[in-house]
Image: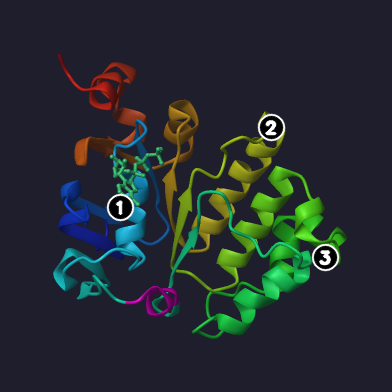
Amino acid sequence: MSAPLLSTHGLVARYGDFQALYGIDFEIAAGEIVALIGANGAGKSTLLKSIMGLLRVAPDMVKLDGRPVGGTKPHRIVAEGVAIVPEGRRLFVGMSVIDNLRVAIDHAGRPAANGWTLERLYGLFPMLKEKQAVPVQSLSGGQQQMVAIGRALLSQPRVLLCDEISLGLAPKVVKEIYQSLPSISEAGTAIVLVEQDIGLARATSNRLYCMLEGRVSLTGRSAEISREAIGEAYFGGA
Ligand code: ATP
């Protein structure tokens, strides 16, 4: 792998007295798609939150381009080029599709260096153009997810963190969303995919990490890891 764009080093994270992560070493290079799998409560969302500066972590535990950024405030991390599509989407209800997208354009800390413009986004998800004046709450779950992905892309991320973007969506729309991911990564944006559907995660990613009880239980190239190895790493050995 080429030099990592984003990495974590012995990352530990807590919620008060409860330790959720026990020394996570993770890395992703520009243009890669890396899946993060694991059972409920394994710590996947906590890892994303730690990277985004939503949990207190030491500076050296998260690096971007080799520079320590752990504990940097979320808006600064976004400005540095990391964006998240959060679990549950968190759109601005009551606002139209275009206004949800404009929030990201207005708050992008960087110019459109990565080239994500509304026009390019409309090329990726034509629905966004058709429905631009529609309030987001009247869209289907899949359409709302496209708004959430679009909003993240318009902040010009070099790394896009996606937290369970297929959850609760119809298979047809999951397919449409997942088919859009290679064109995002091929343009250089690294994608971290937290995904419950192991088959989908494996088929879409270059590499994967499996987490178990706050630790990495398996990592490697997705095409080279057997189902059996994933099963063991997912549920833990006897
Ligand atoms: P899921 O698929 O359910 O989202 P996950 O792998 O993303 O699972 P996390 O949400 O990161 O798991 O949770 C890791 C651990 O931290 C779990 O034991 C969970 O109960 C705990 N946890 C998560 N959020 C909090 C919180 N706000 N306060 C206390 N404990 C939390």
Alpha carbons under labels 1 and 2: distance apart: 27 Å
Q: Residues within 10 Å of mark 2 (few under 14, many from 20)?
A: few
Residue highlighted by disc 2 = 170
Q: Is residue 36 left or right of residue 185?
A: left
The residue identified by callout 1 is 47
Q: Is residue 207 left or right of residue 172?
A: left
**Sooner in the amino-acid sequence: mark 3 or mark 2:** 3
The residue at 51%/49% (across/down) is: 87
Q: Earlier in the sequence, mark 1 or mark 3?
A: 1
Within the image, what quadrant is residue 190 found in? bottom left
Q: Is disc 3 placed on a helix, strand or loop?
A: loop
Q: Of all residues shown, which one is farthest toward the front?
A: 17
Give how far across and how far down residue 143 sits, in percent. 73, 49
Q: x, y percentage for residue 61?
A: 17, 64
Residue at 35% x, 65% y is: 54
Q: Residue 19's spot in the image, x, y percent?
A: 17, 48
- Quarter of the rendered structure image containing ligand 1: top left
**Residue visible at 69% across and 64% down?**
121
Any atom of ligand 1 within 8 Å of the CB at mark 1? yes
SS label for mark 2: loop
Question: Quick one: 157 or 45, which is closer to the camera?
Answer: 45
Q: Looking at the image, can residue 186 be seen?
A: yes
Please name the amino acid that badge 2 sits on.
Ala
Q: Secondary structure at mark 1?
A: helix
Question: Which residues are drawn in magenta?
Answer: 73-78
- What is the three-letter code of the residue carrying label 1? Leu
Q: CA distance from mark 1 to mark 3?
A: 33 Å
